[in-house]
Image (tube, rainbow, N blue to C red):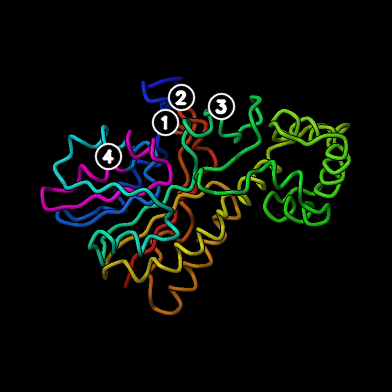
Amino acid sequence: MCTPDQGDGLARHVPVLVNQVSQLLSPPPCGTVVDLTIGQAGHSLVLGSRLGPDGVLVGIDVDQRALDHARTVLRSLDCKVILIRGNFAQVGDLLRGKGIDAVDVMLADLGFSSGQVGDPQSGLSFLSDAPLDMRLDRSIQTTAADIVNDTDEQVLADLIYRYGEDRLSRRIARLIVERRKLKPICTTKELAELVCAAYRGRRHLRIHPATRTFQALRIAVNRELDNLQALLDQAPTLLRSGGRFGVISFHSLEDRLVKQDFRSRAQTGQYKVLTKRPIRPDPQEIAANRRARSARLRIAERI
């Protein structure tokens, strides 16, 4: 569900589970809403439309292009809009820097926008040839190419297994190390071909062979699970009583962290979990937006 260009270099993006997010997070008209991953502002536009002139919508993103695009998308809203460039792992400091100590709604969509995946320089996709980068925040020093070319074989295998849950991680790591002895692995095509070679002879694969390795490297480069844990740790200190926190995840590693955190905090009386099971998109949404198929929404309410 994306088209090549909107004039800002970003592909058109369809937000997932948008109706469920709007209904279940349900911000009060004078409330403060924080979209922790504003992306192309699809969720923010829907949540912000529920706010009145006394409401505040805060959008956070590491990508300045996303913030610039969001500014245009959200200009019709009645509420006050504050856009902040930063990582949600520092959400407490980012909000306090704007004089905000407590909020009514927080939402984190942990997926990637079509614009990010389609950016030829991002190196996030194995479907096109690009520099092996994968940094969502360009201030990060280490790229995927650095990890692939400099990491010890055992450590690399463990990384692919831990973050990609790929059972062929050792074979993949071995092929990578053998190839990089000849020359550095610098592009997505080179890496994808190596991973495919590790899977040669295996049939009836449900996903592309390179999917899990690319996921593992992207998580490692961007410290995604560390950042998510930092967000989960801070959320209870920022939500008002009755405030709601929603997280949309797209793979089991993220969803497991969220599930365990919500459950643990429910046991200690911090949260009431509103989603006993994650909310999934219905068949109609998946048919209209294939990207939605792996989305899982969990929501907790601050007690």
**Dot placed on the residue nearer the N-terminal end, 2 or 1:** 2
Instruction: Pick the residue in front: 82 or 145.
Output: 145
Q: Which residue is mark 3?
A: 120
Q: Does the magenta run of residues contain 268? A: no
Q: Quadrant of residue 204?
A: top right
Q: Residues within 10 Å of mark 2 (few under 14, many from 20)?
A: some
Residue 2 is tagged as 2
Q: Position of residue 281 (x, y in %)?
A: 46, 41
CB under 8 Å between callouts 2 and 3?
Answer: no
In the displayed structure, 50 sits above or below 206; it is below
Q: Which residue is mark 1?
A: 13
Distance between the alpha carbons at the discs numbered 2 and 1 = 6 Å
Distance between the alpha carbons at the discs numbered 2 and 4 = 18 Å
Q: Residue at x 45, y 69 (%)?
A: 233
Q: Which residues are magenta?
A: 44-69
262 sits to left or right of 23:
right
In the displayed structure, 71 sits above or below 264; it is above
CB under 8 Å between callouts 4 and 1?
Answer: no
